[in-house]
Image (cartoon, grey):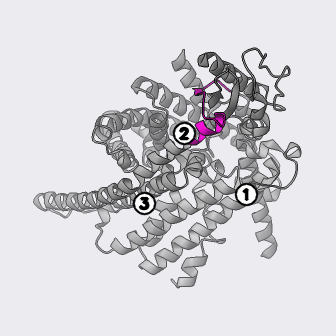
Amino acid sequence: MLGRNYLGAGENVGKIFKLGIILAVFCVISAGGLAIVYMYTQPKIVLNSQLALEGSKKAVLPPSGKGQAIAVSPRGYGGPIEMLVGVDPVGKVSGVKILSQRETPGLGANIVKPKFLDQFKGKSLKDPLEPKKDIDAITGATISSRAVCVGVKEALRKAK
Amino acid sequence: MSLWKSFNQGIIKENPVLRLMIGLCPVLAVSNNAINALGMSVAVAFVLICSNAVVAMIRKTTPDEIRIPIFIIVISTFVTISDYVMNAFTPDLYAALGVFVPLIVVNCIILGRAEAFAYRNPVLNSILDGVGMSLGFALALISIGVIREVLGAGSVFGIALFNPAVAATIMVLPPGAFITIGVLMAALNKFENKVQ
Amino acid sequence: MELLGIFFAAFLINNILLIRFIALCSFFGVSTKIDTSVGMSFAVIFVMTISSAVSWMVYHYVLAPFHLEFLRTAAFILTIAALVQLEELYLKKMIPNLYRAMGIYLPLITTNCAILAVAFLAIDYRYDFLRSMVYSLGVSGGYSLAIVLFAYVRDRMALAPIPKWFQGYPIAFITAALMSLAFLGFTGMFGL
């Protein structure tokens, strides 16, 4: 590099060796530091995701806690919509929660709002579960709204 | 270089985003609302200040030939720390910022400041340079975030201002990011021309 | 069919430059001339394919078995930097014509965040080896498409009367906004 040709071959090898050791020292310090951070944060990260899942389950199930929470991922406009559907023991929807989605912000992404999701409460397989029939679709986001309906239906069928 | 100058040149005069045109990716990608913009600014500030400090500390013992790999190791260490800390303590924000947190490692601002400033200046100056540059970055990022959120979702920091039905959704979609930054740069050009 | 879906999703729907906003520095930097944008495109396709293969292997055969996932940021960036150097040396010696065509773009690529982003995203999406290769081809193809189209538009723009304050970068951003809008139209295609 940088015009260091004046070094002899022997010196060059020694130099490369020295540089290699310096780099290795840096790598070891960095990896050690990261290992400590990892040790402290990892349990918390695992706990967080467990808590989040528990919380979502609690939110979609009836207050008694009976019933099943079923995860489905229907295909939305921007990709799969991961959602959790609570079904009570008599086969009615007790709650719906969107875990992750990539719908259009401002339009399809409004499917996460309670105003839309609360419509599904109390529905069962006897209901049509379709936009414009018994569900008010989100304006400008028929595909996303229909995807949620499909997901709820799928969950109800699975719960049987 | 005076301490004050180290600090304040990054804010407007050499604003990394609007002037030097570096570090654009996160600016456009996570500025669709003000909270994400703030979170990203904090993460970048943490990495930039820490890596500037460490690079300035080790600059006398670092051989010239391998300085770049060493900078990269230092930077990626701090990026990984912020990655894990954010994941552990602010999981929602972490999910919203996604791949852009690990991508801070290739954010040209950080390697650029390590090479152009911290490697040639004392620790205190380098820390102040980091603070100033982070403020400049945050200023650009948060103002774009606020503009996009207000126009596109009718709210600011999640607080509703007006009915979102009349907001221009395009502003929170990808094209809105390009429009906002383009108009902002033009406005800065015009403003500066007037001052001169 | 699923592979085709992954390819087109990466190529058009989630276009890395216009929709995902990754690697924008190079998008504005090298699109001033058509020639340079074509050269950069080839360099990106070449490096991205190789580096995503290598970083996939590094993650699945080195980091994961030893539970060292927390080193992935450092490991990937160092792998990519070393790989770019090796590719440069190899091309210079073995395929000098190709080296002359895209040699000057290779060093720039180390800081091109698209390469690193693809390595991360392929891991995040839990793609297997074949899928991550298809994905990286889609991404680099989408990169090339967007940057070459953009270079042609900017070429035309040189002759257009542009308001004084908007000359240079501001108008480039507005143009990018319009292109991004066009690419947004691909969303929902192929039922993805």
Residue A6, above or below A45: below
Quadrant of the drawing holding the C terminus of chain C: top right
Chain for mark 2?
A: A
Q: Residue C73: horizontal and vertical position, in percent?
A: 41, 49
- Tell me: A156 left or right of B89: right
- Tell me: C142 left or right of A77: left
- Is circle 2 on the same chain as circle 3? no
Q: According to the image, label 1 marks what residue?
A: B157
Label 1: element kind: loop
Query: Which of the two discs, 3 and 1, labels the residue nearer the N terminus?
Result: 3
Chain for mark 1?
A: B
Residue at 74% across, 54% down: B158
Q: According to the image, label 2 marks what residue?
A: A53
Quadrant of the drawing holding the N terminus of chain C: top right
Residue at 76% across, 59% down: B184
Residue C180, above or below B85: above
Give, as a single range, the part of the protein colored magenta: A55-76
Q: Residue B148: horizontal and vertical position, in percent?
A: 76, 52
Q: CA distance from mark 1 to mark 2?
A: 26 Å
Label 3: element kind: helix
